[in-house]
Amino acid sequence: MNPGPVAVAFCSVILLAAPAAASAARPATTEEKAAVSSIYTPYPECSEVVVSERDPRYARWDFVPGDTCEPTGNGFGIARRGANGVWRDYYQASDNGDPCPLTPLPTEVGVELRACRRPSRHIYITNFLSERALFKPRQLPHGAHSFLGALRWRSWDRRVARARGVLDYSDRSVTFKAPIRLRASRVRFCGIRRIYSRLTLTFVRRADHDRYGHFEGPLRMRCPTPR
């Protein structure tokens, strides 16, 4: 049996299935390194400079320690080349822990230059009892004697998410269940994780609003505990 055609076909499948390699910043040319380094230090030999492949207007500068190189700081610099070809300081930071949308850099360039981190793909909401981030939770705590259950969400991962569910309340003297509407809004960053920071409850039925209206209104959602 001649295995040649089968092997060729198999290799073709593997090549087609393999994901495209992520772009990586390239080493700066001698001229680029000299120009960018001069923004942050008078000694190019004490510098490492890389240029974005996605957008070559951006370059990252890092200090390189050595016997003849005195430390100039504990961070990095991002330079940007203007239309006139002149490089200028554009952004500086001591670490790359911030989510890219909070920096002036395009997200893909910031990730490529290790200047910031890509934000979470999804938006989450915090369970205030466990302090854990949840995605489309079916149930949420609401207080010492109540919880929000049977939640059915729509428009999650957008600026505002909405849900229908039930407020289930029980203490020594009062027990009731009432249909509710929830509105999750005000997306903010907790590290690189996006969080809905406000949860607003309203009752579906007028009678529940009149009797239990003090349960309605916005709740502020804290950041989850880092794990």
Image (cartoon, rainbow, N blue to C red):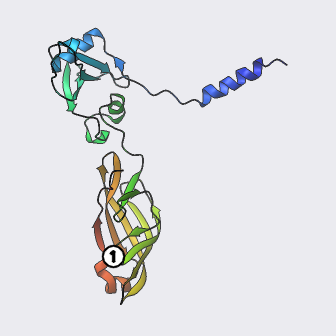
Q: Please provide percent x and percent y for residue 111.
A: 35, 33
Q: Secondary structure at mark 1?
A: loop
Q: Quadrant of the N terminus?
A: top right
Q: Is residue 92 above or below residue 57?
A: below
Q: Please provide percent x and percent y for residue 178.
A: 42, 80
| 121 left or right, relative to 7 | left
**Residue in the image at 31% along x and 15% along y:** 28
The image quadrant of residue 30 is: top left
Residue 85 visible at all: no
For disc 1, the marked residue is 144
Q: Is residue 84 above or below residue 165?
A: above
**Residue in the image at 23% along x and 24% along y:** 79
In this rendered view, identify the residue nearer to me: 26 or 48: 48
In this rendered view, identify the residue nearer to me: 219 or 181: 219
Q: Please provide percent x and percent y for residue 151.
A: 46, 68
Q: Is residue 157 above or below residue 88?
A: below
Q: Is residue 40 above or below residue 196?
A: above
The amino acid marked with disc number 1 is Ala
In this rendered view, identify the residue nearer to me: 47 or 215: 47
| 71 left or right, relative to 128 | left
The image quadrant of residue 210 is: bottom left
| 79 left or right, relative to 195 | left
The image quadrant of residue 166 is: bottom left
**Residue in the image at 34% along x and 38% along y:** 117
**Residue in the image at 33% along x and 83% along y:** 212
